[in-house]
Image: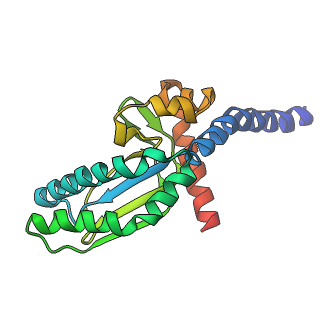
Amino acid sequence: MRKLKIFIPIFLILLLISGIAKPIITSESISQKVFRLHILANSDSQHDQNLKLLVKDEILKLSTELFTDAKSVNDARHIAEDNIKAFENTAQQVVEANGYSYNISVTTDKEYFNTREYDGFIMPAGEYNTLKIIIGNGEGHNWWCVMYPSVCISGCTDDFDEIMNDEEKEMLTSSKFIPKFKIIEIYERIKNKILS
């Protein structure tokens, strides 16, 4: 009887781990293949939110030209790093053309994101390579998209077929993973705190 009391919790823990381990591994694989754009508005005022969207439009126009030759997430990150000044100048021009004097900060970094839904697919929580643009204080709601593969640039998800394997594509598009995404978020937050 004592062995049974020990075995059952161990068995349940192993079962839980084996059921969650694979989605965690798959979500981490996805985060290593994706380059995201993240734009933070100065504030949540309607004017600042509208300005953020105007900046977004011009950044995406510039990105269409710059990212056409990106063949990997590393290519995308290098292109972004090599063009920080162009992104900064583009955003600053939009801000000033609309009568604002906010400073613009543009960086590339690894940034943690919670699970997010985007045009028919779900990006799992994780740390992603990111081009981050902060308008003014950056205290308003943000806007984000996937620059590589070029979902927000081209407006289609065809590039995912070339970049992602079948398991990764299933995770991005299947609703059966939604309950596991919360567990992945918890795992990623704990991992983030431990590694920070």
Name the outermost residue toward the left: 99
Would you place residue 54 above or below residue 184 in this image?
Answer: below
**Which of the image's four quarters has the N terminus?**
top right
Residue 177 visible in image: no
Q: Does residue 154 appear in the picture of this structure?
A: yes
Write the residue at 75% across / 38% down.
Answer: 13
Q: 182 above or below 35?
A: above
Residue 86 image offset from top left, x and y in percent: 33, 65
In the rendered structure, the answer to whether residue 193 lies left or right of residue 69 reads right
Name the residue nearer the viewer: 73 or 169: 73
Q: Quadrant of the C terminus?
A: bottom right
Left or right? Give the position of 55 relative to 88. Answer: left
Q: At 43% from the left edge and 45% from the top edge, which residue is drawn?
A: 68
Residue 172 is situated, as x and y percent measured from the top left of the image, at 50, 32
Which residue is at the front of the view, 86 or 18?
A: 86
Q: How many marks?
A: 0
Percent position (x, y) of residue 102?
Answer: 20, 73
In the picture provided, is 5 more to the left or to the right than 21?
A: right
Q: Position of residue 57 (x, y in %)?
A: 23, 50
**Res 190 quadrant in image:** bottom right
Quarter of the view holding residue 193: bottom right
- The image's colouring method is rainbow
Above or below: residue 38 compared with residue 171: below
Q: Residue drawn at (35%, 32%), measured in percent from left and top?
A: 119
> Looking at the image, which residue is at 61% across and 45% down?
28
